[in-house]
Image (tube, grey):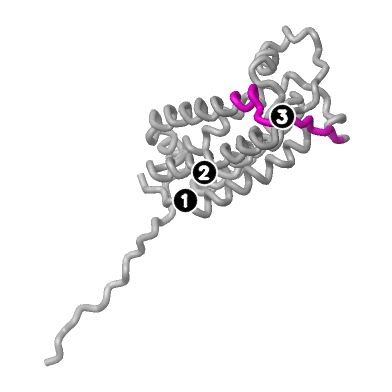
Amino acid sequence: MPEHRPPPQPERSTALSPDARPWAVQLWQRMRHRFWLKLIGISLFMWVFFTGYFHLLRYPAFPVTEMPLTALDRLIPFQPGTVFAYLSLWLYVGTPPGLLLGFRPLVVYGLWAAALCLTGLACFYFFPTAVPALALDPDLARFPAFALLQGVDAAGNACPSLHVATAMFSAIWIHRLLGDMRAPPVLQALSGVWFLLIVHSTLATKQHVVLDVLAGLPLGAAFAFASMRWRPREPRL
């Protein structure tokens, strides 16, 4: 008699199927996932970055070049109130790692972000730049946050704008992660508006000029798309 063989079973796919949970549930679980590790890691990352940033700002290795103004720079008025959007970058850049799942994806994301920052610092080292001096309103007491910014972050290390580059890097990642969660498009739109406010604030506070912004945008986008092309798969909670 012919040997009876069971019908072949279809091979199981190793790929993760799309998460069917509501986006709000995914968002909350992503925010809670390794929360303290993310908080401490992001804080240490910023401390290391600012150590290098302020060293180059105060001790440039080569003569500092003043960035030229464009017609658009002259059209944008000085708006000290936008300093709050400017400072909000430090919340914005923490959003993508705060939403990532898994230790390895988090580490790889940090390495790509570090590569972006090191590229910017290398530009500041070999070609230090600064924006033209701004004739400020003497009554800066009305804007204590701006006065603090001017006292800490002088208008050097200008081109490319790492403020804009890291905002662009984060904006692309936020768009991708919200899409993975199938979040409402309005959240992606709000992220886009926040990104634009940050970019505008770099010009309205006169911390950067248009050419700095135009250099920072493609720098951040290049690292964002490269980091998405070569990234580990996130685990399922």
At 83% from the left and 31% from the top, the residue drawn is 73
Q: CA distance from mark 1 to mark 2?
A: 10 Å
Q: Observer-nearest residue: 206 or 173?
A: 206
Across and down, in percent, residue 66 comes to 79, 30
Residue position for label 3: 202
User: In the rendered structure, which disc, 2 or 3, sits on the residue that comes first in sequence?
Assistant: 2
Residue position for label 1: 231
Q: Amino acid under label 3?
A: Thr
At 39% from the left and 56% from the top, the residue drawn is 16
Q: Callout 2 environment at 10 Å: few (<14), some (14 to 19), or many (20+)? A: some
Q: Is residue 216 above or below residue 226?
A: above
Across and down, in percent, residue 203 comes to 76, 29
Q: Secondary structure at mark 1?
A: loop
Specify whether residue 197 is in view: no
Q: Are the residues flagged by discs 1 and 2 in contact, CB closer than 8 Å?
A: yes
**In front of the other: label 2 or label 3?**
2
Q: Is residue 9 above or below residue 14?
A: below
Q: Are the residues flagged by discs 3 and 1 in contact, CB closer than 8 Å?
A: no
Instruction: Give the farthest residue toward the left.
Output: 1
Residue position for label 2: 112
Q: Is residue 120 left or right of residue 46?
A: right
Q: Is residue 35 above or below residue 134?
A: below
Q: Observer-nearest residue: 91 or 57?
A: 57
Write the start and end of the magenta stretch as one range. Answer: 54-70
Across and down, in percent, residue 232 comes to 43, 51
Q: Is residue 155 magenta?
A: no
- The part of the image, by quadrant, that contains residue 196 is top right
